[in-house]
Image (cartoon, rainbow, N blue to C red):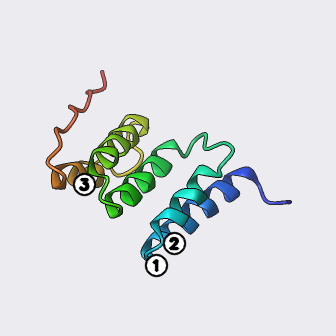
Amino acid sequence: NGYPKAMQVVARERLARVLLDQGQPAEALTVLQGADDTTGFESRFAEVRGDIQFAQGRNDEAVAAYREALDALEAGAGDRARLVMKLESLGAEIPVEESQS
């Protein structure tokens, strides 16, 4: 296929979100797991995986995925506040953000 790798990865992540929104969390998880390489998109994939696991009632796994997403965020990139909000809604401890020196 002639599409750049980054475009394929983003399309896969968006398809997983659509499937989740349509009430198909198992299918959404399968789409995510089918990605060969998510380099550069680790945080986004982990967050979607957390959303899927939350929808399936697998809250401990969702917390782990959201923490993984936080860990994978590059400084100044992504939406840390949204991830923190998701962790708080699950009653999870919020990792302290490391300040940049």
Query: Farthest residue toward the right?
Result: 2
C-alpha span from label 1 to label 2: 5 Å
**Residue 61 vertical position relative to residue 57 in the rendered view, above or below:** above
Type of amino acid under label 2: Leu
Query: Which residue lies under the disc numbered 2?
Result: 19
Q: Which mark is residue 22?
A: 1
Instruction: Give the amino acid at mark 3.
Output: Lys
Q: CA distance from mark 3 to mark 1?
A: 20 Å
Question: In the rendered structure, which disc, 3 or 1, sits on the residue that comes first in sequence?
Answer: 1
Task: Indicate the position of residue 17 as horizontal and vertical percent values.
Answer: 48, 67
Marks 2, 3: nearer the viewer: 2
Q: CA distance from mark 2 to mark 3?
A: 20 Å
Q: Is residue 69 left or right of residue 87?
A: right
Is residue 87 rendered to the left or right of residue 64?
left
Q: Nearer the viewer, residue 101 or 84?
A: 84
Q: Residue at x 55, y 65 (%)?
A: 27
Q: Quadrant of the C terminus?
A: top left
Which SS class for mark 2? helix
> 95 above or below 12?
above
Q: Nearer the viewer, mark 3 or mark 1?
A: 1
- The image position of residue 36, as x and y in percent, is 69, 45
Q: Are marks 1 and 2 in contact (CB under 8 Å)?
A: yes
Could you tell me the amino acid type at mark 1? Gln
